[in-house]
Image (cartoon, grey):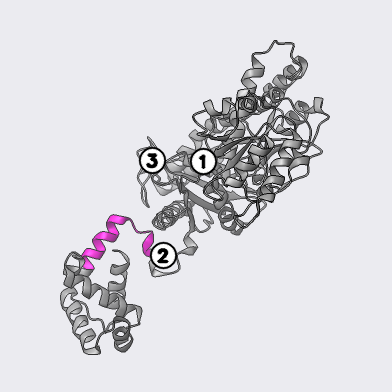
């Protein structure tokens, strides 16, 4: 692959800022992303360099840009791809420096990620190498490929697959990460990394399966300075793409039992025909229903006794695979077993059983992971609701209702949010979980004629009511806040009482109208 090929990749939407035909004809050997002021010692000849220009500021003299580009020239870099996100554009001093030192310069728009560039370049190189004669050394040896195929067929552990795949390279430190930083596999010499540390390395990693969703993606990461031919790297990635497909097949096989369990608990699973809420189910007696739930729990590999926690998730209006997103975060929960299924409307739910851990660990662990889940696809807002702990299977239906109520509250927040039922400690938070049509109906009936906010007089009275309640019914503070005479406030509140039929001297009527205002 040559530098000029980057301009032909419409999906990347790159712009050439400077570079003549000889520079564009250079062959690309790899990709390095860096924001060091002096990256020279980390570069290999022929690499294109990706930089977000964090190291540069408008106050810098052009010497900073000159030293950066000089380091690229001395290392034999093929081109510089500069991101526009940090400064809104590529500084002109950087263009001048590239012109002086003979480095082709491209601008990278905000909507093009460095990861997309890296993956595209390596996949293109993989295609080029695949067309070379079979005798090329840039591939795993035939005996290694055969052994890896046998290990896959025998269900070998991912650590074993990875260690054998990189054995020819001297078994360097190597990892396979999930999209949220979960370590799926690592070689014996690779130190353990936290999820946060792993996420920080994903930009320099290779996607295992480019067709996977943002939540189901795996990444192959080979840190350090070990040189690996691109074709070999992609053959190793292909091994884990096959391993991942096997995992997905096993999970799909278990999905039937999960659907049956969720249906018994009253959730509207696709095709189940069951209804949401207490009292739904097969219509048989409570004894047979309990026995059916116990059998479904056993079929799912969950204990017949609690404690249990229930989670329900949606991906908002943008849609997407909520089950895959939920499944990814659940795999981080050590000491807990879970079963998960898809629901109607693109949602997903899970029942989590505690083994060696504590049920109190579930909520903080999931909340800590939620921003990372959102970062997998920032165009989609993941919402989640978590129930309180269900001690016995008979409490699971109520826990599912709680999780759905908390999910509705999370969705009304309008941002990526995970809400536990225990978070609903205020009237506003409690009402957030009420379905929109119920909220609207309550507001209309409680406010009476005032619900018609198109009437200017009614809008004025609603503002006065809201301020009056916010100031704990104080006439003086309400008048001060609205810049009115106290007599005017008295008159307006009397009008509110007349139109709504409420007495604002009574606490229960104040609460009714406060709730109605919150439900608008």
Residue at image point 81% right, 31% down? 171
Task: Tell me if residue 432 can be seen.
Answer: yes
Q: Is residue 485 left or right of residue 96?
A: left
Q: Residues within 10 Å of mark 3 (few under 14, many from 20)?
A: few
The residue singled out by tag 1 in the image is: 109
Which circle's residue, 2 or 1, is located before the other in the chain?
A: 1
Is 444 one of the magenta-colored residues?
Answer: yes
Query: Quick one: quadrant of the C terminus?
Result: bottom left
Residue 481: numbered disc: none
Q: Position of residue 61 (x, y in %)?
A: 66, 54
The location of residue 94, given as percent across then percent down, is 62, 44
- Circles 3 and 1: CB distance less than 8 Å? no
Identify the residue position indicated by label 2 in the image: 429
| SS at mark 1 in the image | loop
**Pointer 2 with pointer 1, Cβ within 8 A:** no
For marks 3 and 2, give the one nearer the viewer.
Answer: 2
């Amino acid at each position: 692959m040559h530098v000029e090929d980057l301009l032909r990749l419409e999906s990347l939407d790159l712009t050439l800022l400077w570079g003549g035909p000889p520079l564009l004809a250079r062959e690309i050997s790899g990709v390095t992303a860096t924001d060091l002021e002096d990256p020279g010692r980390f570069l290999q000849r022929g690499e294109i360099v990706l930089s977000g220009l964090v190291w540069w500021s408008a106050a810098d003299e052009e010497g900073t840009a000159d030293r950066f580009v000089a380091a690229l020239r001395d290392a034999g870099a093929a081109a510089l791809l500069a991101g526009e996100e940090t400064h809104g554009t590529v500084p002109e001093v950087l263009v001048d420096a590239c012109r002086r030192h003979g480095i082709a310069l491209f601008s990278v728009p905000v909507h093009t990620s460095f990861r997309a560039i890296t993956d595209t370049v390596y996949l293109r190189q993989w295609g080029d190498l695949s067309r070379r004669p079979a005798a090329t050394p840039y591939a795993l040896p035939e005996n290694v490929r055969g052994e890896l195929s046998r290990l896959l067929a025998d269900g070998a552990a991912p650590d074993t697959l990875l260690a054998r795949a990189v054995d020819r390279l001297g078994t360097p430190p190597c990892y396979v990460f999930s999209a949220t930083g979960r370590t799926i596999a690592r070689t014996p010499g690779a130190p353990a990394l936290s999820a946060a540390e792993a996420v920080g390395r994903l930009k320099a990693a290779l996607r295992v399966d480019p067709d996977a969703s943002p939540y189901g993606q795996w990444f192959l990461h080979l840190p350090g300075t070990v040189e690996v031919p691109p074709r070999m790297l992609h053959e190793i990635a292909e091994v884990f793409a096959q391993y991942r497909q096997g995992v997905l097949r096993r999970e799909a096989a278990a999905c039937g039992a999960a659907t049956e369990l969720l249906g018994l608990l009253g959730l509207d699973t696709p095709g189940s025909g069951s209804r949401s809420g207490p009292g739904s189910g097969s219509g048989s007696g409570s004894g047979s229903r309990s026995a059916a739930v116990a059998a479904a729990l056993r079929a799912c590999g969950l204990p017949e006794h609690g404690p249990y926690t229930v989670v329900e998730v949606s991906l908002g209006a943008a849609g997407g695979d909520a089950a895959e997103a939920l499944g990814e975060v659940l795999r981080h929960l050590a000491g807990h077993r879970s079963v998960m299924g898809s629901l109607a409307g693109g949602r997903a739910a899970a029942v989590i059983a505690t083994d060696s851990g504590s049920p109190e660990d579930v909520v903080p662990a999931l909340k800590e992971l939620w921003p990372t889940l959102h970062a997998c696809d920032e165009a989609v807002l993941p919402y989640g609701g978590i129930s309180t702990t269900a001690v016995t299977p008979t409490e699971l239906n109520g826990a599912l209702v709680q999780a759905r109520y908390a999910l509705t509250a999370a969705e009304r927040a309008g941002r990526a949010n995970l809400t536990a039922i225990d978070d609903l400690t205020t009237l506003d938070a409690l009402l957030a979980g009420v379905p929109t049509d119920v909220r609207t109906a309550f507001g209309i009936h409680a406010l009476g004629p005032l619900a018609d906010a198109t009437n200017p007089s009614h809008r004025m009275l609603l503002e006065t009511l809201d301020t009056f309640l916010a100031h704990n019914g104080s006439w003086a503070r309400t008048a001060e806040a609205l810049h009115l005479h106290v007599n005017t406030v008295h008159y307006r509140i009397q009008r509110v009482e007349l139109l709504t039929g409420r007495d604002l001297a009574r606490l229960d009527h104040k609460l009714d109208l406060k709730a109605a205002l919150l439900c608008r």
